[in-house]
Amino acid sequence: MPTDKPGAEFGSCCERLKDALTNEDFEPLFAVDEAGVLYMSVGLIDAEGEDEANMVDHPVYFCPFCGTKLQTEEEVEAKLNAEAA
Ligand SMILES: [Zn+2]
């Protein structure tokens, strides 16, 4: 398995998170973006004039399954700033 696959870094704490990130049988509500930040979808917004609802994402700081600290607010900001630069 290639280690540069998105999500590989974040699936290392427990099998459940790994499953949620790599399982192809369902659409996970977790996603790692291009910057390497792990996000979780927390809801839907009905955008006016659009047919599809938009997902509302929020960075995940702790694994929701085992409680392992996955990233800090500072790390998320640094990644996003690096991506924007
Ligand atoms: Zn975990």
Image (tube, grey):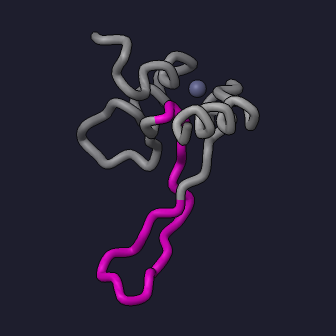
Residue at 68% across, 25% down: 68
Q: Nearer the viewer, residue 62 or 4?
A: 4
Residue at 42% across, 20% down: 8
Q: Nearer the viewer, residue 84 or 4?
A: 84
Give the quadrant of the C terminus.
top right
User: Relative to residue 62, is residue 25 drawn left or right?
Assistant: left
Residue 17 percent across, percent down from the top left: 49, 30
Residue 39 percent across, percent down from the top left: 53, 44
Give, as a single range, the part of the protein colored magenta: 35-56
User: Relative to residue 79, is residue 50 drawn left or right?
Assistant: left
Q: To which quarter of the image does residue 4 belong? A: top left
Quarter of the displayed picture in which ligand 1 can be seen:
top right
Q: Is residue 79 visible?
A: yes
Residue 38 part of the magenta segment: yes
Q: Can residue 38 be seen in this view?
A: no
Residue at 62% across, 41% down: 60
Q: To which quarter of the image does residue 33 belong? A: top left
